[in-house]
Amino acid sequence: MEYRRFRTKLCYVFLAFAGISFMMNAQELTIERALEIAEENNPSLVQSKLNIERYQYNVAAQKASLKSKFALNLNPVEYSKSRRFDNRLSQWYTNETLNTEGTFSVVQPILLTDGTVSLINTFGWQDNQSIVEGVNNRNKAFNNNLYLQLRQPIFTHNVQKMALKRIEMQYENAGISYALQRLRIESDITTQFYSVYISQEDVKISKDELENAKQSYDIIKNKVEADLAAKEELYQAELNLASAQSKVETNIVALENNKDNLKQTLGMSLDENISVLSDIKVSPVVIDMEKAIQNGLVSRLELRQRELDVEESELQMIETKANNEFKGDITLSVGVIGDNEKFNNMFDNPTQNPRVSVSFAVPIFDWGEKKARVNAQKAAQTIAKLEHANQKIDIELDVRRVWREIDNYRTQIDIAEKNVRNAQLTYDINLIRYREGDLTGMQISQFQTQLSNEKKNYAQTLINYKKALLSLKIASLYDFEKNTPIIPVRELDNIK
């Protein structure tokens, strides 16, 4: 018996010391600080930021591709010797060639028309020798071909404009995905933050229970030693004290597990010790449901995502209709060619080389392939529009549901607060009766459990109310506590 009492006291002292050391060494976090840490370290948010950066570079690359391209292609040495047949003279000849050349080009895409303008200059030197029936013909000369060329597709869609628009849409969508991810992370962190808070409160409540159980144990111990109570009451008090100790230890384990989950979401080291600070106060918040719905329908980023899906389906329809379509291509070029054995005399007798080319691709019969693909894309367009319409309904339903929950939680808070007050008064009254011997240890333990449960229920109801306000803020993108609209992410201002 004495050993059991000594172990009980030692365990109680150890738990108290551990709690004090734990609180002294822990990093204290507020909900605001937790969100700041997550924005910098949360793996999902970091990945979303990198995705934005990737598409930002893609947009920059696509815009750079619309500027003039300068290129230089060099062929320093080329030598060949072959035996060939001349169809014009119906005779064989041997040809030996040594040449070198380089081509400098400037190509400017035209975004407005999807055409290109090119300035091309090819300069070279060659030593060409042919032997025909023993006669040796040889030519050494410099040559230069300079021309300006315009290439313009006709009767088809503008590929360059579509490519730029698509990559800009992908960039905007990446920014929206980051904003939505940040809102989801805020919701997850808030839930986990309050889970840690509840676990801390559970530890505090269970320590209060342990303190009350110890007081009850001391009371009944003195009574038993004075022969004022039966020994079985002492046994029950010991059982209550051991249960209270076990509950403290269990709640500490749950607290540490919840902290690890929070640290993982925040991107913190699991070895870092933390505690949360939260002053949960419920202040009256006036919420206009119609205003919440309208702001949600105007501001929710999911709607913009659905609009981007509709725009993407329209681009895909244009590309689908371009399959097996009638289209053409016009090429115009003008320039001069000069050649001479001497470099300085290349353009003494230049030759103009104008060129005009018009080509058409005329589909004749495709066995209904294009029609089937177009019909399939029409169905995809209809689906995208339906999803956009359904998203509006989902937003309104979400706001209505959360609004009703908030209204219900206000009532539940009042009830829970009264229950805590009544449970505390009931416990205090019955504790006096217990000290006077009118109640057993089992009965006072039940009143203690009732008080603890009402305290937990009250704290959980407050947290549910705060989480419902956050859900409404996310659903409507409006903070009714501060009476200000929410701008989900600053990066979206630069996406256009």
Image: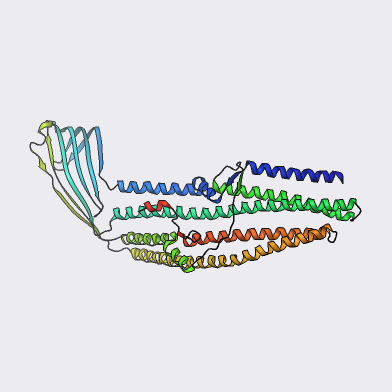
Question: In this orientation, which residue lies closer to the viewer: 52 or 253?
Answer: 253
Residue plotted at (63% across, 65% down)? 414
324 over 80 or under it: above or below: below
Residue in view at x 64 percent, y 58 percent: 459
Above or below, 413 relative to 152: below
Tell me, what colour scheme is on the image?
Answer: rainbow
Residue 177 image-quadrant placement:
bottom left
Percent across and percent down for residue 109 are 25, 49
Viewer-closest of 23 and 256: 23
Q: Position of residue 318 (x, y in %)?
A: 32, 61
Left or right of 1 in this view: 166? left
Give the image location of residue 265, x and y in percent. 55, 49
Which image quadrant for residue 401? bottom right
Locate residue 432: give its quadrant.
bottom right
Q: Quadrant of the C terminus?
A: bottom left
Decide if residue 238 is in sight here.
no
Left or right relative to 182: residue 63:
left
Residue 334 makes an appearance in the image = yes
Horizontal placement of 213 versus 273: left or right? Answer: right
Coordinates of residue 133 in the picture (x, y in percent): 14, 33
Q: Nearer the viewer, residue 442 or 246?
A: 442
The answer to whether 137 appears left or right of 67 in the picture is left
- Residue at the outermost left position: 349
The residue shown at (76%, 49%) is 245
